[in-house]
Image (cartoon, rainbow, N blue to C red):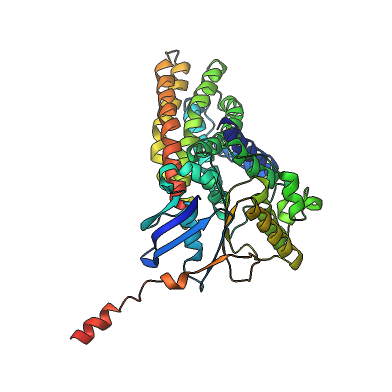
Amino acid sequence: MVSGFLQVVARDLRLALRQRADALMVVLFFVLTAAIFPFGVGPEPNLLERMGPGVIWVTALLAVLLSLERLFLADYEDGSLELLVLTPLPLEFAVLAKTLAHWLTTGVPLIAAAPLLALLYNMDPAALPMLVVAMLLGSPSLSLIGAIGAALVLGARRGGVLIPLLVLPLNVPVLIFGVGAVDAALAGLNARPHLLFLGAILLVFLVVTPLAGAAALRQAAE
Amino acid sequence: MSLFQGRSLTCVRGERRVFQGLDFALPAGGALVLTGANGSGKSSLLRVMAGLLHPAAGGLLWAGRPVAEDAEAHRARLHYLGHLDAVKPVLTLAENLAFWARLRAAAGGGGLRIEAALAAFDLTALAEVPGRRLSAGQRRRLALARLIAAPAELWLLDEPTVGLDRASLGRLAAALAEHRAGGGRVVAATHAPIELPGAEMLSLEAFAPPPVPDLALTLEEAW
């Protein structure tokens, strides 16, 4: 079962590697959107410093949304999904494997780019490790929550537009505690409660996503 | 003798009843050819047999035990070939084949026969060609090679001959014969004649539901 799980992860990573432009586009979207804010609100260092964590989290969330449609749609359209449903590997594991591959190809590059943007926003470098830790804990939840939405809209026309409507409200807690952790570190407060909440959200969706995602995929494959 | 059986299967798609009261029995080494007009439910029956679709009534039995009791074991013993070939354009032919074979083997299937599968459908020379450069017939052969790459007892084939040239039809017939000689079972839905000696024919038109009387018309007449 573990070996089947790894087969699916390896296959999706290989697909992402052969289609690097997709992953690159997500990171570019993240960097460009975050970089455009100062043009709108003005170049005041204090204001930007204050806005930094929120802008970075919100744009990361939008960048993840942008990448979600691909998660199951290609498999659905070329018939791979039917085969995936019919392999002896429980579909729940396949959903988790595909979500892990999604996080490795979108979440991790976003985390790598985030410190750069933080410096752009004049954020205190002492808070950078906290930003990375909070994103390490929070971004897998973005992929997991998004996977439910991506699985649910399969077969719907213009599904890509529906995903944000389904997923955005569920992402709000991740956003709140993710920004909270960084703000706490900036203010010299204890960020632990925020990180614990991020961890709790991650654990909940590690269980919910495979179950809900597999149910949605079975429905789509009927 | 272990039988793969369907008992009074009824299938409903959308609002429409596709077939009803359908029975079949398939012994080891046997073959079943599904015939019927477009829309008579051949594909739906194959999907019911695979477990992709739940029958509205009736059930499937394997060696006398309901298939629904252990869906995972049922998935492990079947290969389903649908209309779509599930070929990833950016992976090479060999990578496409190896992924599905390894996935089955990893999750408790039998051994791997990737080389043999490539040879069986004359794909060895194309092994390193990316999926996007394969022709429709070559993609179909790749999909068929999947049947051999990881062994499974029951083959469910939906229009397996689409896009195949004459030589490939011969290879398919040979693969089917070898599979059945080893005790494998085949269910195939097809319009084209397919070489399956001794196969039982199942016409789905015999199980079509009686036409539903037009309600408006009936009411009008009653009036």
Q: Position of residue B173 (x, y in %)?
A: 69, 61
Q: Nearer the viewer, residue A118 or B184?
A: B184
Residue drawn at 55 percent across, 18 percent down:
A129
Q: Quadrant of residue A180?
A: top left
Q: Quadrant of residue A22?
A: top right
Q: Nearer the viewer, residue B99 or A199?
A: B99
Q: Position of residue B113 (x, y in %)?
A: 71, 43
Q: Nearer the viewer, residue B75 or B60?
A: B60
Name the side, left or right, on which B131 lies relative to A29: right
Name the side, left or right, on which B162 lies relative to B127: left
Q: Does A98 appear above or below B29?
A: above
Q: Position of residue B28 (x, y in %)?
A: 56, 53
Residue drawn at 40 percent across, 23 percent down:
A197
Q: Position of residue A171 (x, y in %)?
A: 42, 36
Name the side, left or right, on which B59 lies relative to A116: left
How many marks the image carries: the answer is 0
Q: Does A115 appear above or below B69?
A: above
Q: Does B129 appear above or below A181?
A: below
Q: Does B98 appear above or below A154?
A: above
Residue A2 visible in this rendered orientation of the protein: yes
